[in-house]
Amino acid sequence: MGSQYYDSKDLARFSDIGNNRPDLAEKFFEWYDATLAEGSLSAREKALIALAVAHALQCPYCIDAFSRDCLEKGADLDQMTEAVHVSACVRAGAALVHGVQMRKHVEKVQM
Amino acid sequence: MSVTISNPSGSGACDAPVHDRTFDRAIGECGLWPLTAGSVETLQINVGRLCNQGCRHCHWDAGPTRTEVMSKRIFMACLAALDKSGTVTTVDLTGGAPELNPHFRWFVTECRQRGLRVIDRCNLTVLLEPGQEDTVQFLASERVEIAASLPHLREPNSDRQRGVGTFRKSIEAFRKLNDVGYGDGRSGLRLVLVTNPGGAYLPGSQKSLESEWKRELERLYGLHFDALHCLTNMPLGRFRLWLESSGNLALYLDRLVDAFNPKAAANVMCRHLVSVGWDGRLFDCDFNQALEIPLDKSVSSTITDFDARGLAGRRIMTGDHCFGCTAGCGSSCRGTVA
């Protein structure tokens, strides 16, 4: 294993996923581009959502790509930081709400 | 072949291989090579390097200590060129800060008396400098169009590029312009804001940023303007030095090349513009001027032998820095072009 498992240069090779089954990759990229285009939500709002999801998934490629995309859509560091906090607190909330599951289990087995 | 973009500020060409694509090859692939000019509609005059600011993105290294300033003799040659051109309708004044040139007001008045549209590329804060107390009134009385640079609508983002305190000064100057009717949409006093990214990335969508800036500047400060122009930072001068020192140069050049847009290439502003240097030399654009890339040898090279007919149809001297004007939605002094 190399010193870096993730290499930022690999992002430029994203289209390689079309090797062997280009028909599937074409469908994915078409859907991807259509989804992130300006719609009822602005392209910037979508980029900020994508940035938040990238943090939830902890995907370094997505964080690089959508950090730049957010800037190029006119977002600033305040807005991007808020998006990351949204991601983080939803993740934290999702963990905490499982505390109810824990409580139900304990209530059932404990005298 | 790899892309290298030379630097006018003296640190030489970039040795980092960036992309296996030159600008001439890129425009060749879309049938635009060699790039040729049409009729000369705009004379863009760079009146000198003197500026009251020292912005981090400046491709000229302009600042308060620069001494290169256009003389009255060259301005008079510009007027003579305008008188005989027959096709030039717009005089676009840039710098440095054009207002600091001692002949600025005289020249503007001369141009306006000839019925020419005059654009002043104003950094806003200069309007608060000593000696500039009535510049706003002068500009309004001559009905000069103002292209005012403002990097961002939030203070920290703007000050990071232009210096601490410049945003508040810009807002104060902006208000002075609004007070005499600039940007109200009724007076005919046109006020355009010009923004450029605060780092190594492309500008956002001009259309969507314009509506956001109009809404927010009205809400936060009660200010109004007519249009927003989004410009791409050119990897030259002080901005290039920052790209180098921050390790962003290769990444940024690659970004410009990757975002090449044939539609933007077809509409680059140099096709209908000639750029005049402070010393009277002619160039295809302000960036070629910064790089000291002269006009094609077959045409007049100084303002004293300006020949609009000969300049129309000239071959435009291109280089890999031209990717800065053709990336994404394109970039020109009148905003995006595609």
Image: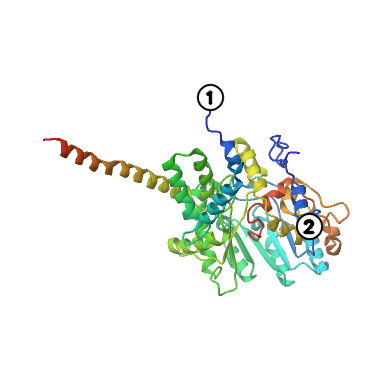
Q: Which residue is mark 2?
A: B74
Residue farthest to the bottom? Answer: B186
Q: Residues within 10 Å of mark 2 (few under 14, many from 20)?
A: many
Residue B223 sits above or below residue B321 on the image: below
- Which quarter of the figure has residue A109? top left
- Indicate the quadrant containing the N terminus of chain B: top left, top right, bottom left or bottom right: top right
Q: Which numbered dot is residue A1?
A: 1
Frontmost residue, B174 versus B110: B174
User: B177 and B147: which one is in front?
Assistant: B147
In the depicted structure, whether residue A104 falls above or below residue B214: above
Which residue corresponds to the image point at 71% horizontal and 47% vertical from the top-left?
Answer: B321
Check disc 1 and report its element: helix, strand or loop: loop
Whole-angstrom CA distance, mark 1 to mark 2, is 66 Å
- The x and y percentages for residue B65 are 65, 45
Tell me if B103 is positioned left or right of B315 in this view.
Answer: left
Q: Position of residue A62 (x, y in %)?
A: 50, 43
- x, y percent for residue B110: 73, 68
Name the mark on residue A104. Answer: none
Q: Amino acid at mark 1?
A: Met
Answer left or right for B192 relative to B175. Answer: right
Residue shown at the point (78%, 51%) measured from the top left: B28
Seen in the picture, residue B332 relative to B15 is either above or below; the reply is below
Residue B245 visible in the current orientation: yes
Q: Chain of mark 1?
A: A
